[in-house]
Amino acid sequence: MRQAVVGLLAHVDAGKTTLAEAMLHRAGAIRTAGRVDRGNSHLDTNAMERERGITIFSSAAALDWSGAHLMLVDAPGHVDFSAEAERTIAALDLALVVVGAGDGVQGHTETLWDLLERHGTPAIVFVSKCDLENPGRAVLMKELQARLSPACIDLAALLAGDPAATEDAAATDETALDEYLDCSALSPATVARLVRARRIHPVLFGAALKEEGVDELLGALALLAEERTWPEEFAARVWRISRSDRGERLAWLKVTGGVLRAKMVLEGTDRGEPWTEKVNEVRLYQGASYQTVAEVPAGQICAVTGLTHVLPGSSLGAEPAGERPSLAPVLSYQVIPGEGVDTTALVRALRELADEDPLLGVTWHEQLQEVHVQLMGEVQQDVIAELLRERYGMEVTFGPGGILYRETVTEAVEGVGHFEPLRHYAEVRLLLEPLPRGAGVVLGTRCSEDDLDRNWQRLILTHLGERDHAGVLTGAPLTDARITLLAGRAHAKHTEGGDFRQATYRAVRQALMTAREQGSCELLEPWYRFRLAVPAERVGRALADLTRMAAVFGAPLDAGELSRIEGEVPASEVGSYALEVARYTSGRGRLSLEFAGYWPCHNAEEVIEAAAYNPEADLPNTPDSVFCSHGAGHTVPWQDVPARAHTTVDPTRLRPWREADAALFSR
């Protein structure tokens, strides 16, 4: 059977959900097309979505057209929920990017397009709202080619054999060029092959509300659907976690191998701990309604109940591990509980919400007695507050947002942690090394099993990976570092699992304090990749602003009526600059931003001074160790720990790291 999972992606207000309704109606999947403005669309199933008129959570539906089975996924369009959109892309065979004819390509559209390119997802563009005032098809095509890709081609002209469109498509592929030279045309099969290979990006025009151009779009999607051979061994990718109206935890899967069956027993690991669970129900959703099925074959999407350990991005069966998300929040907000709200219960509720959105980043600050979350923006604030109110009966407000910093090391350093109060014993020695930007924290071991049993080594590596480790400059989380277990020691009678947790945490902090003393700790901050388009007469103002914001950028490029400047800028400096651009260009300029990653902080000294963080006073993250002397435990300052340690390190273990060093952890 020819089939495809098709994701609908767009900037907010481009008409994406209206198009989905029209597609379902034209295919006979629903009797009447709903409308966003009336709050009765089939795919905006949540009350908040219907009230706001925007898609907040991904939803799914299916239709059949011209012998092809198309599974539609309506992804959020608002920039605050772009992380959910990125997770959705991992489940797609094909992306349908919707552009409003009147608004054209928006900044968030470019961000989504870049994500599709990064994931290698074929894309087709539908320009909707063509019944309303717009600059015309030729101008719109020129904008799509300039801001998205030169390979955007008018599909109607291509299939009609228009020489210019056909020649442009044929020039992207040698085999297609031979076909064009022989036949002066390209077959539909060749066009489909070029689209799947991302050689070309078809563009169609229409008006979803009037269902104009929708049949042609469905025909194009059916053409691109394919009957492919999937691996026989079961494999699946988790792309979303949600809750049903009855509070059931739903794991949304794309089956990528074999067959998923109800009551199937699955295995995996959660934060280093193995788990085994049974799939209770397998559901195929059509908006808010669903049907329970016995099995789902490879290539299709579904939701299952019974899996409590999986998170978005988890891999099941033979599915390889997915890529790290490229989008991430850069702001942290304090969550202020309302009157009568228990703080412990609030933290627990937020962590349940973080199951659905792992980037929520719930943190309890013991010293401040405050709970903080990581968010993309103010609209997401409102959604979190509403979810807490609906599900848990909790009223909350939010404090002002602050930039999320990270810390790393610039040179390799050893760390030792020892925990030996009376009748307890554990020691951990590790190596902390810098990694390239964006690598995160990587774990490995070089410890001999003759020195420390494998089970203890596994436990240490689990403790290393179960939490963020606070840096020693501002207390920000450690990133872009490799932590390698070098040695450890346990006691045959007195060692318990919690002892190694204490020794492990202290070893990391001791290493960081040593690095700080050596001047090899570095503060990182989030940077945006930006595109700024302004009229030529405003380029001087734009360049002055970017310089003031410590941006790194190239020379302005001529883009027709506007000049375009591209580069990177610290997130802390951007603020409301997009509104300022609109003001000083009288609405003609535009700024688009995309998270570029964590780079060295441009004003590190100022940030560190303002934080006034004392790592030795941060008792929950102490770098000191506990040794036993004369029958009692006593604290040894971090700088004296190496001289008192019971383990030593073979110099050969300090060689450059190899991939094989992680083998123990992965087995």
Image: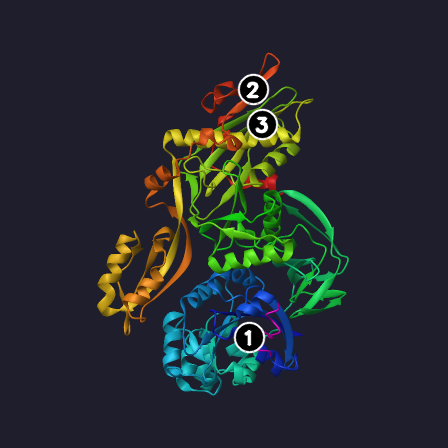
Tag in front: 3 or 2: 2
Q: Is residue 424 visible?
A: yes
The residue singled out by tag 3 in the image is 488
Query: Quadrant where the C terminus lies?
Result: top right
The rendered magenta stretch, by its main secondary structure, is classed as: loop
Tag in front: 1 or 3: 1
Residue reaching furthest to the front: 339
Task: Tell me residue 112's x, y (percent).
Answer: 46, 65
State the residue at coordinates (52%, 48%).
Answer: 336
State the residue at coordinates (64%, 46%).
Answer: 270
Along the line of sight, the residue nearer the viewer: 501 or 275: 501
- C-alpha distance separating marks 2 and 1: 65 Å
Horizontally, residue 485 falls left or right of residue 539, namely right
Magenta segment, which residues? 34-45
Along the line of sight, the residue nearer the viewer: 289 or 568: 289
The residue singled out by tag 2 in the image is 627
Amino acid type, residue under disc 1 in the picture: Val
Of the residues under marks 2 and 1, which one precedes in the sequence? 1
**656, above or below 136, in the image:** above
Horizontally, residue 301 falls left or right of residue 537, namely right
The residue singled out by tag 1 in the image is 36
Amino acid type, residue under disc 2 in the picture: Phe
| Residue 324 falls within the magenta-colored stretch | no
Q: Mark 1: give few (<14), some (14-19) or many (20+) Cα within 10 Å.
A: many
Q: Element under label 3? A: strand
- C-alpha distance separating marks 3 and 2: 15 Å
State which quadrant residue 356 falls in. Answer: bottom right
- C-alpha distance separating marks 1 and 3: 60 Å
Kindly check if marks 2 and 1 are in contact, taking CB atoms under 8 A apart as contact: no
Q: Element under label 1? A: loop
**199, above or below 568, in the image:** below
Amino acid type, residue under disc 3 in the picture: Gly
